[in-house]
Amino acid sequence: MAKKTLRDVALAGKRVVMRVDFNVPMAKDGSGKITDDTRIVAALPSIKYVLEQGGSLVLMSHLGRPKGVKLGAEPKAENAAFTLKPVAEALSEKLGLAVKFVPDCMAADEVVAALKPGEVALLENTRFYKAEDGKVKKDDEKKGIHLTDEEFAAKKAELKAERQEMAKKLASYGDIYCNDAFGTAHRAHASTAVVADYLQPAVSGFLLEKELKFLGDAVENPVRPFVAILGGAKVSDKLAVVKNLLAKVDTLIIGGGMAYTFKKAQGLKVGASLCEDEQVAYCGEMLKAAEARGVKILLPVDNVVADKFPAEKDASDITIKVCEGDIEDGWMGLDIGPKSVELFAEAIKGAKTVVWNGPMGCFEFAPLAKGTYGVCDAVATVKANGGTSIIGGGDSVSAVKKSGKAAEMSHISTGGGASLEFLEGKTLPGVAALNDL
């Protein structure tokens, strides 16, 4: 279902409370230097549009995983490392105006009330409060917490009430709610979904709109042939994705660590490779389901194997070789081999729609990166041939950027977890909360 966007509401003289994804990487030296401003740049079109239309903006985001406190409590001192203040400064430079930084997202009334059309305020990290996500664990071994069913239910109810209170406060800052943070749209947090219960209209920003269009069209209305490529470490992370995509794709390519569980399901030996034995039967079922549906599943036909996992950045401490078929005991598959790259590339280059989530191996190490970059080269031809290529997932995005092929892709998703859940066929709370067209 298509959602209303900023274009569908009058913005002149209105304050827009906008959820953005400013969860940017920072330098580890404590300097507060932003090492990659991609997410800030991605939010600029929506921000500038509101300002150009005569509105003002109250921006909110999280950054990292700080230790939240109860509403009304003083933020923890260690949370200083997760402040959004450097983001406010970076955004000020990009917009050419002073972004007002509010050091407590729950105490912004004065700053917000003084905002004039064309002005922007950025609230401090929403995750400084536990109420943002409202999560509670029944058992926490590290903290020695073991709640009874009654205690767990009471704690959940308490945090739910706090989450609603927080959402209501955030909603009080504006006239319109806009979600432009696809990266957190799969979370039913106070600032991503619950806020829309108290602030209407609730619309999509342009970045979220773009994500939904590309991923939605790819999954629901793909131009065929439709090829999906799944990689990464574990099958268990993508069980539902595999099942959902089998009903939609023409070809499913599986690489990375997850491929070895499938290979074991085919009766092959995988040596010391990553393999989830408890998922072997499931993988066997998926292989049979694909055959019954007439869907091709392509698995690696050769692998780059090593005598151990590398400890050195240049992988100089390992011995590697290419093997086909069974992998010997004591050897582990860490990348797809050249014949697999050729096989996968042939399927990819003939596709009109390609969705890629997950690398083919440990591409962080140069000797183990050829498979991922070989697939990347193939995916880069799809757009040039009139097709659509969509990259989702943090590691896939990182690989594409490192390869220098980013500009040759149709769309690079800003949401790893969100894009994965979208591919699973799940409803994203941050999207469901918005007004339908």
Image: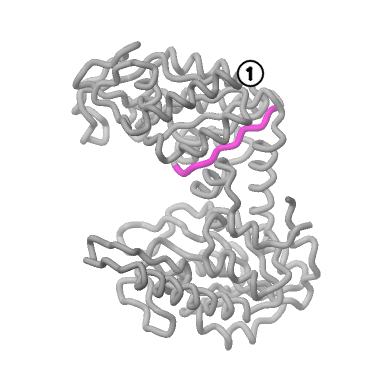
Q: Is residue 19 above or below residue 372?
A: below
Q: Is 228 placed left or right of 207 in the picture?
A: left
Work out whether 413 lies above or below 141.
above
At x 68%, y 60%, the residue is: 46
Q: Quadrant of residue 340?
A: top left
Is 230 or 124 nearer to us in this picture? 230
Q: Mark 1 points at which residue?
A: 350
* Image: 391 above or below 11: above
Query: Observer-nearest residue: 164 or 128?
Result: 164
Mark 1: which amino acid?
A: Gly
**Magenta-tinted stretch:** 387-394
Please provide percent x and percent y for residue 364.
35, 35
The location of residue 427, given as percent across then percent down, is 60, 51
Residue farthest bottom in this picture = 110
Q: Which residue is drawn at 45% across and 69% down?
A: 134
Q: How many labels does the image show?
A: 1
Quadrant for residue 13, please give it.
bottom right
- Please, what secondary structure does the residue beneath circle 1 have? loop
At a point 73% along the width and 69% down the height, the residue shown is 201
Q: Looking at the picture, tell me which residue is in the foreground, 357 or 427.
A: 427
318 part of magenta stretch: no
Quarter of the figure that contains the C terminus: bottom right
State the image coordinates of residue 192 (x, y, percent, origin top left).
Answer: 57, 64
How dense is the environment of label 1, judged by Cα within 10 Å: few (below 14), some, or many (20 and up)?
some
Residue 314: x and y in percent read 26, 32
Q: Residue at x 64, y 53 (%)?
A: 207
